[in-house]
Image: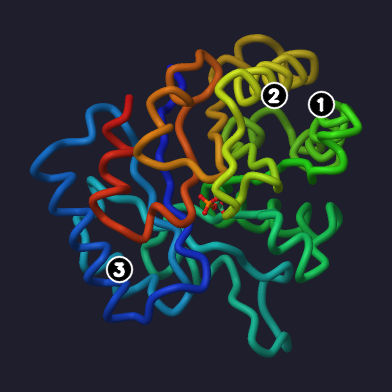
């Protein structure tokens, strides 16, 4: 059965102490209220990884980095390798977020290197994809997002592909307060699932978790998650408040 996942993406927010407090708050509410069968992930800054892993019960809360280096090690000043991420106790890595593609020139070629390294290190990649507003308005969003997959995660072996979590995040919905409608989300997720089925077969497509991201909040989460092809969310702004994040986790 495919996993339901709610993952927070804190982006470049909170200092270490604030992050630890936030993580503890999420952990204690999850302990108290439960998260049913939802896998909870916190995507935190590199500097926070060790402290957050130490602060939470890792049987309840998974910790993720938001990026990793495209090289395994060496003379790459300022970079953080998959091995470093893994050694903190983190289990996931967010890759290909549109902010990284747009502001840091992250291409499919770079992403393929990061994906290979992450998988080799035993980290679960949360692979982000999604179209800009012009592409949505031109009506070519379905082909555009499938092409992103074809250039990256469809290059993997079936065994490696099975380890990937996909997050569909329309760029026009990220941090804008404009959410994709429930139908828009379902249509794209179904489109991606059928592309996965064509590439890797029905069984793998059915097992792949596809999260929605883009202004998801406690008010719209239930409607989005009610769609049969939406398996949870990647949550930016609303993951910075423990109560909001928990409401989203409990929106199933
Ligand atoms: C994100 O950046 O992954 C995201 C979904 O952001 P927000 O929820 O703030 O739109």
Which numbered dot is residue 122? none
- Give above or below for 55 relative to 129: below
Q: Position of residue 137 (x, y in %)?
A: 85, 34
Q: Name the residue carrying label 2.
A: 188
Q: Name the residue carrying label 3.
A: 52
**What residue lies at 57% left-to-right and 14% top-to-bottom?**
206
Q: Secondary structure at mark 2?
A: helix
Q: Nearer the viewer, mark 3 or mark 1?
A: 1
Q: Tell whether circle 1 marks a residue whose Cβ is less than 8 angstroms from ligand 1.
A: no
Q: Between disc 2 and disc 1, whose residue precedes? A: 1
Instruction: Give the total of numbered labels.
Output: 3
Q: Within 10 Å of the Cα at label 3, are there few (<14), some (14-19), or many (20+) other Cα atoms?
A: many
Q: Name the residue carrying label 1.
A: 142
Q: Is residue 36 left or right of residue 106?
A: left
Q: Position of residue 111 (x, y in %)?
A: 76, 55
Q: Position of residue 44 (x, y in %)?
A: 43, 65
- Give above or below for 49 relative to 179: below
Which of these two is toward me, 114 or 130? Answer: 130
Q: Between disc 2 and disc 3, whose residue precedes? A: 3
**What residue lies at 54% left-to-right and 48% top-to-bottom?**
177
**What residue lies at 27% left-to-right and 39% top-to-bottom?**
247
Q: Secondary structure at mark 3?
A: helix
Q: Is residue 241 left or right of residue 191?
A: left
């Amino acid at each position: 059965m495919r996993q339901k996942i709610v993952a927070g993406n804190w982006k470049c927010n909170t200092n270490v102490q604030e992050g630890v407090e936030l993580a503890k708050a999420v952990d204690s509410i999850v302990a108290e209220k439960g998260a049913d069968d939802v896998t909870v992930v916190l995507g935190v800054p590199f500097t926070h990884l060790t402290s957050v892993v130490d602060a939470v019960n890792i049987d309840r809360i998974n910790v993720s980095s938001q990026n990793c280096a495209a090289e395994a090690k060496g003379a790459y000043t300022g970079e953080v390798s998959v091995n470093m991420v893994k050694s903190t106790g983190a289990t996931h890595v967010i890759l290909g977020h549109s902010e990284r593609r747009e502001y840091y020139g992250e291409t499919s070629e770079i992403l393929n290197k990061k994906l290979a390294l992450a998988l080799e290190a035993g980290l679960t990649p949360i692979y982000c994809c999604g179209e800009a507003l012009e592409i949505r308005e031109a009506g070519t969003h379905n082909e555009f997002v499938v092409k992103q997959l074809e250039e990256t995660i469809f290059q993997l072996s079936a065994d490696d592909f099975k380890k990937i979590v996909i997050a569909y995040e329309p760029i026009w919905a990220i941090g804008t307060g404009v959410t994709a409608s429930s139908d828009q989300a379902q249509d794209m997720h179904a489109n991606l699932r059928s592309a996965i089925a064509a590439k890797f077969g029905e069984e793998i497509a059915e097992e792949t978790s596809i999260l929605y991201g883009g202004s998801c909040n406690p008010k719209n989460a239930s409607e989005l998650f009610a769609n049969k092809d939406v398996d949870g969310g990647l949550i930016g702004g609303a993951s910075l408040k423990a109560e909001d994040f928990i409401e989203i986790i409990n929106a199933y």
